[in-house]
Amino acid sequence: MQSTLFHRAAAGLTALMISGMTYASDWTERSNLDLRPGVTEVSQDIQDLHTTVLWIVTVIGLLVFGLIVISMIRHRRSKNPNPATFHENVFLEVLWTVIPFVILIAMAVPATRVLVKLDDTAESQLTVKVTGYRWKWSYEYLTYEDDNNIGVSFFSNLATPPEQYNNPVLSGGLFPYGTAKDLVGKEAPEKDHNYQLEVDKKLVIPSGQKVRFLVTSDDVIHSFWVPDFGGKKDAIPGFVNEMWALVPEGKEGTYYGQCAELCGKNHAFMPVAVEVVTQDEFKAWIAEEKEKAASGPDLTPFSGLDQAMEEGQQVYATACALCHGANGEGGIGLPFAGTDFATKSEYLNEHIDVLVNGRAAMPSFKAQLTPRQIAAVVTYERNAFGNDTGDLIQPADVNDHE
Amino acid sequence: MSTAAATHDDHHDHHHAPTGLKRWLFSTNHKDIGTLYLWFSFAMFLVGGFMAMVIRAELLEPGMQFVDPEFFNQMTTVHGLVMVFGAVMPATVGLANWMIPLMIGAPDMALPRMNNWSFWILPFAFGILIFAVLMSAFGAGNPSAPNFGWTFYAPLSTKYGPASTDLFILSVHMMGISSIMGAINVVVTVFNMRAPGMTLMKMPLFVWTWLITAFLLIAVIPVLAGVVTMMLTDRHFGTSFFDAAGGGDPVLFQHVFWFFGHPEVYIMILPSFGIVSAIIPAFARKPLFGYASMVYATASIALLSFVVWAHHMFTVGMPLAGTLFFMYMTMLISVPTGVKVFNWVATMWRGSMTFELPMKWAIAFVVLFTCGGLSGLMLAMTPIDFQYHDTYFVVAHFHYVLVTGAIFSIFAAAYYWLPKWSGVMPSKLLGELHFWNSLISANLLFFPMHFVGLAGMPRRYADYALQFADYNFWISIGGFWFGLSQVIFLVVAVRCAMKKGEPAPAKPWEGAEGLEWEVPSPAPFHTFDTPPVIK
C-alpha cells in the first residue's frame, strides 16, 4: 500500500480544514467543499444556480431544524408538562403549501434559462464525434470552420500503467480471479499526479470557438463528462446526442473528466482528457494530423525481436492489460501465459485474426491500432509472460491479413 | 380515537397455537408471518451490509487492493438489490403484517394462506441471487454474478450480461410476485376488515400510508416484471426491445425501468412516514398535527411519483420540452413532502416531549430525511443535475433518504413496537449505544459523499483519482463503524426474542394511541376475535 492509514488520516484532516473555493485548471487542485465553477460560461451559470439553490435549501433546513431544536429544548416534559392540544390550523397549512410553491417558481425561472442555453448547439465552429467504447473513447473530427472533410480520428486510452493501480493485498480464496497473484503484497509504485486521469492521446480543441460534440457509443451506455465544461451527456449505442462547450480564450490547458455511466468492469478506467489550445495551435495541429492520416499506415519492418517487444509492451499495457491481465494471467479475457493459443504455431494466424477482426466479446482492433501496433503486440504476447515462441510478426503481415 | 378494549384474548392462546417447525413453515398467523418477514429483512440487511463493507474496503485507498473490478461491480449490484428488495421492503411488509390487523382491530390479514406464500417466496428469490454471488466468489472457472448495477441498464445487462442474468431475472420475478401478493393482502384487509366504526379517516396514518403504498406496488411491480421479461426475450428469443441494431431502443429500457423505479422509491419511504406519524405524537403527548393534510400529502406524493421518472435520466438526451416537464414535476414533489415535515414539527411544537429510543430515531429521521429531501430538490434542477448526475452526490442523496430515512424509521418502529411483539422492553443501554453509534457513523459515512460528488467523483467506481482519496478514507471509516453498530441491534433483538429484559405492560409508552396498545404484551396469538367498536 502506498501510505499508512495514519498518513491518510492526517492528510484527510488537513484537507478537511483547508477548503479552496478558487478556480483551478488542475483538477487535482479541486475545491473540497463545493461544486467546481469550471471554465465555460455555462459551467459558471450552473455553479451560480447551484449556489443559489444551496443557499435556499440551507435556509429552509436551518429553519426547520431550528424549530425542532427549540421545541426539543423548550417543549420537553420537564419544561412543559402540559402539552397543548391543537392539531390543525388551516391558515398555517395553506401557508406552508403556498410559500414553498412560490419559492419553487423563483427557482424554476433561472433553471429554465440555463437549460435552454445548454440545449442550443447551433453555430458551432468545430464538430467532434465522441464514441464510447469499452473502455476507451474515440474522437473523430468531422468539420472545422469550412472544412467538412477532415478525416482525423483516433482512440484515447488510459495511460496510467497497471502496476500503479493493481496492488492486491489478498489473493486466492474469496476473490480469486483477476488478481495478479505474484503482485500480492508488493509495494506499489508511487502514483502519478494525474493517476487514473491521464490518457495516451488527448482530445484537442481550440479556445474561443464553440465546439459541438456528437456523442454516441459502440457497445453499452457510457457518459461523456468534463466537469469544467459543464454538463454531461450519455453515449448510447444507436443514438447520437449533442452537447457543446466554448472554452474562453486565455483558459487554455488540459481538462479532465471521467466516464459517468456504469459500463462494465473497467468503468473507472476510461478518463477523458481534453487539451484546449489557441486557434493557431489548433490549426497547425489539425493540419499535421490530416497529413498523417493521409499518408497511410507505417509498414516499416521491425529491426528485430527486441524492437517489436518493446513497442508491443506499451500497446499491451494500454490496450490489452485491462482484460487480459497485467501479466497475461487473464481476467475477463483469456490468459496468454503458457497457453496453447499464445505458444503453438498453428494458432499464430488465428491470433492475428482475433486482433484484426474481433471475436465474441473481444472487439476488433483494426480501427484502434495500426498494423505496426498489432504486429508488435502479437509478437509481445507470444514472447512475454514466460512464452518463448520466437515468432516475429511484421507490420506487413498484419496489413495483408484479411 | 376512543376504543373498546379487546379483553379476554389470552384464553384463546392455548387452543390453536402451533409449535415447532410447523408453526413457522405453514404459518397463516399475521403475527408469525410478520416476525418471519422482520427477521428475514434483518438478515438481508446484514448480508447487504457486508457487501457494502467489501465496497468500502476497496475504496479505502486509491488502487485495487482487495477485489477485482468485476467483483466490485457485482458487490454494488447485489448490495443495491438486497437492500431495496431484501431489507427495506420486507421490513415494511413485516411491520404491515404485524401492525395493520392490530391497528384496525382485525383478527388477521384477509388472505392468510397467500400471506404465507408471499413470505416463503422471498428466501428462495434471494437464495438464487446470493447463490450467483457465492458461485462468483468461490466458484471454479470464471463465473460472474450480476454486475450491471441495481438499475441493470440495457444493453449492459442484455447484450453483455453474464449467464447469471437469467438467475437474476427469475429472482426479480419472484420478488415481484411476493410484493404484489403482500400488497393485495393489505388492500383487501384494510378495505374489508376494519373494526366497526373505524372509517377511513379514522385509520392510523401507518395504515393509510401502507394502503397507498400497496396501490403503488400493484401499479408498478408489473412494470418491473414486464421490463425483465423483455430482457429475457432480448437475451434468448431474438427480440430487440432494447437493441438499436435490431430497431429497438436502449433508452426505452430506462423509461420503463424508472416508471417502476421512481414509485419504488416512495414504496420504500411512505410506510416510514406512517411510522413517524405514530411515534412523534406518542412522545410529544399531543395529537398529530394536520391528520387530513397528511393523508392528502401522502396521496399526492404517490400520484406525483408516476410523472417524475425521467429525472433519473436527464442526461440521456431527451427533448427540451420533456426535460422541462420532468424538472417542474420533480420540484413539485417537495411541496407535499414539505407539508409532512412541517406537520411533524408542528406536532412537536408546544408538546410535552420525552426522548425514549423510538422518539430519538424518529427525530433523527425527520432531520436527516429532510437533508436528503433538500439535496433531492437540488438534484431536481436539471442544469445542475447535469453536473451531479451519476456522481457521489446522488449516492449521498439516496442514502440519506433510504438509510437515515427509511431504515432509521424502521428502527424507530422496532423499538416502539418490540415490547408489543416480544413482551419485554428492549435493553435501554444497548439501544442507546445502537442509536448514537448509528447516528454519528451514518453521517460520517454519507455526508462527505456530497463533497466527493461535487468534486466530480462518479459513482460505481472501483478506483479513483488521487484527489478523492481524503474523503473516501473517512467515508470508509464511517462505513465500517456504521456496519459494526448494527450488530448491537442484533443483540437487542435476540435478547427480546429470548424474553430477556423488563416485562412490558400492555401500553409501555404513556402517550401512545391506538388499538394495538389495548391488547396485552406480548400480543396473544389470536387477537380481536370479537371486533372492538370504535366510537
Image (spheres, rainbow, N blue to C red):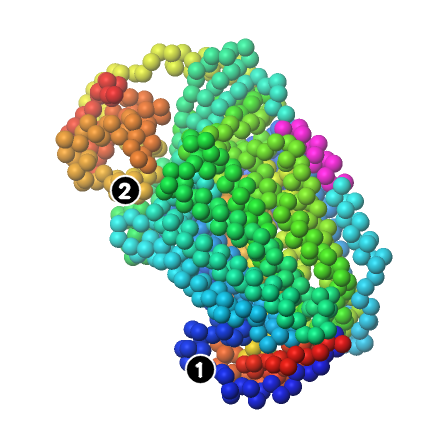
- C-alpha span from label 2 to label 1: 54 Å
Residue B166 in percent (x, y) is at: 38, 49
Residue range (magenta): A106-119
The crowding category of the residue bearing disc 2, from other C-alpha atoms within 10 Å (few below 14, some 14 to 19, many at least 20), is many
Does residue A2 show up?
A: no
The amino acid beneath tag 2 is Gly
**Quick check: is A289 in the magenta stretch?**
no
Asked where in the image residue A66 lies, by quadrant, the reply is: bottom right
Q: Pick the quarter of the image with the N terminus of chain B.
A: bottom right
Magenta stretch: dominant SS? helix
The amino acid beneath tag 1 is Thr
The crowding category of the residue bearing disc 1, from other C-alpha atoms within 10 Å (few below 14, some 14 to 19, many at least 20), is few
**Residue to which mark 2 is pinned:** A330
**Residue to which mark 1 is pinned:** B19
Question: Looking at the image, is A276 positioned above or below residue B53?
Answer: above
Residue B162 in percent (x, y) is at: 36, 45
Question: Looking at the image, is B301 positioned above or below residue A401?
Answer: below
Q: Residue at x 14, y 31 (%)?
A: A346
Residue B344 in percent (x, y) is at: 73, 63
Question: Looking at the image, is B461 positioned above or below residue A201?
Answer: below
